[in-house]
């Protein structure tokens, strides 16, 4: 197992908590967790990725930040969460770390963030892997997903977060005490408490991320039609993801592949919303091979 070092970097005046491991000489890999701070009923952060990071760290430098409002990274004072804000801080982080170009792996909202980064500065991105991302996938006219309706109260308690992972997973073996303890630590942390307090004072705070997702997704449909994505792109979906079915993932793949020749769509069987946790070996093999070929 690789030893990850965790430290704090000041990015655009914001203390950003980052875990790193320095493996082989392959292109560095940046992992972007999902979640909408103060909305998603589990507390996301770098801890979500679990043991799959060790596999990547054997061959590459691995960089895993807590995005603003999650884990141990606060939001800038007075600013609501948005993918644009997250992207600016991630670019600032990799520049400070001396990384000229990196592969980017993004889960859920982090998948759409990876797309945003690939469009904003393609020269800094070697490839992107979009993982189980309903935020990035076409919405269409599907029935609303009710999987996470009516979680146990209070939200972000141990019971509530365990219930959320149960709802979203095909295999439950990955829902261990390490994951739940890390999620509870994030829930009790200053960054999460500040988000909840801000949302209580300003109702628009809770909708800011959804508005950001809508802006970026709308913009990308225009990009797909006009010039296409400038970097190699991979989509990785769980076969039984209750938040976003394979058809939605494949719909996004078709949009990207129409003008980007280096595109792939991979499905990991018997996994749900967290394929990188539910079948870490298959996830590493699939994503690692795509990165090596890109």
Image: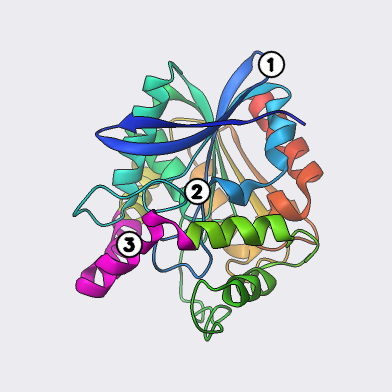
For the residues carrying marks 2 and 3, which lies nearer the camera in this image?
3
Alpha-carbon span between mark 2 and mark 3? 22 Å
Residue 218 within the segment the image draws in magenta = no
Alpha-carbon span between mark 2 and mark 1? 25 Å
Mark 2 neighbour density, 10 Å: few (under 14) some (14–19) many (20 or more): many
Q: Find numbered disc 1 in the image and state the secondary structure of the residue it sits on.
A: loop
**Mark found first going from the N terminus, 2 or 3:** 2
Q: Is residue 140 above or below residue 69?
A: below
Q: Which label belongs to residue 169? A: none
What residue is rendered at 72% in x and 60% in y? 177
Residue 207 within the segment the image draws in magenta = yes
For the residues carrying marks 2 and 1, which lies nearer the camera in this image?
1
Alpha-carbon span between mark 3 and mark 1? 37 Å
**Quadrant location of residue 273?**
bottom right
Residue to which mark 2 is pinned: 111
Task: Using residue 51 as the reference point, say whether residue 260 is left or right of it.
Answer: left
Q: Is the residue under label 1 in contact with that under label 2 (CB below 8 Å)?
A: no
Task: Give the x, y percent position of residue 233.
Answer: 55, 37
Task: Give the x, y percent position of residue 234.
Answer: 60, 40
Q: Which label belongs to residue 195? A: 3
Q: Is the magenta stretch mostly helix, strand or loop?
A: helix
**Quadrant location of residue 175?**
bottom right
Task: Using residue 110 as the reference point, say whether residue 24 is left or right of it.
Answer: right
Mark 3 neighbour density, 10 Å: few (under 14) some (14–19) many (20 or more): many
Residue to which mark 1 is pinned: 24
Q: Find numbered disc 3 in the image and state the secondary structure of the residue it sits on.
A: helix
Magenta residues, as a range? 188-215
Q: Which color scheme did the rendering employ for the protein? A: rainbow
Q: In this view, does 214 lie above or below 199?
A: above
The residue lying furthest to the top in this view is 25
């Amino acid at each position: 197992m690789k030893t990850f070092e965790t430290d704090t970097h000041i990015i655009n005046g914001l203390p950003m908590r980052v875990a790193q491991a320095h493996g082989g000489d392959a292109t560095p890999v940046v992992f972007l967790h999902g979640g909408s701070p103060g909305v998603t009923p589990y507390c996301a952060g770098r801890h979500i990725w679990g043991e799959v990071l060790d596999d990547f760290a054997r061959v590459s430098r691995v960089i895993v930040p807590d995005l603003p409002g999650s884990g141990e990274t606060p939001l800038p004072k007075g600013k609501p969460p948005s993918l644009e804000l997250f992207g600016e801080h991630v670019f600032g982080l990799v520049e400070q770390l001396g990384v000229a170009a990196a592969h980017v792996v993004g889960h859920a909202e982090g998948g759409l963030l990876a797309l945003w980064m690939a469009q904003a500065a393609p020269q800094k991105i070697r490839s992107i892997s979009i993982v189980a991302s309903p935020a990035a996938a076409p919405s269409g006219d599907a029935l609303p997903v009710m999987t996470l309706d009516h979680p146990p109260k209070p939200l972000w308690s141990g019971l509530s977060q365990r219930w959320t992972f149960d709802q979203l997973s095909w295999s439950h073996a990955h829902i261990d005490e390490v994951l739940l303890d890390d999620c509870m630590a994030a829930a009790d942390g200053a960054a999460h408490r500040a988000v909840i307090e801000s949302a209580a004072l300003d109702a628009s705070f809770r909708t800011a991320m959804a508005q950001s997702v809508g802006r970026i997704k709308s913009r990308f449909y225009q990009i797909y039609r006009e010039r296409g994505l400038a970097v190699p792109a991979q989509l990785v979906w769980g076969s039984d993801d209750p938040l976003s079915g394979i058809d939605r993932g494949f719909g996004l793949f078709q949009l990207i592949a129409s003008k980007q020749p280096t595109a792939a769509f991979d499905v990991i069987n018997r996994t749900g919303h967290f394929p990188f946790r539910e079948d870490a070996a298959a996830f590493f093999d699939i994503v690692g091979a795509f990165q090596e070929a890109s």
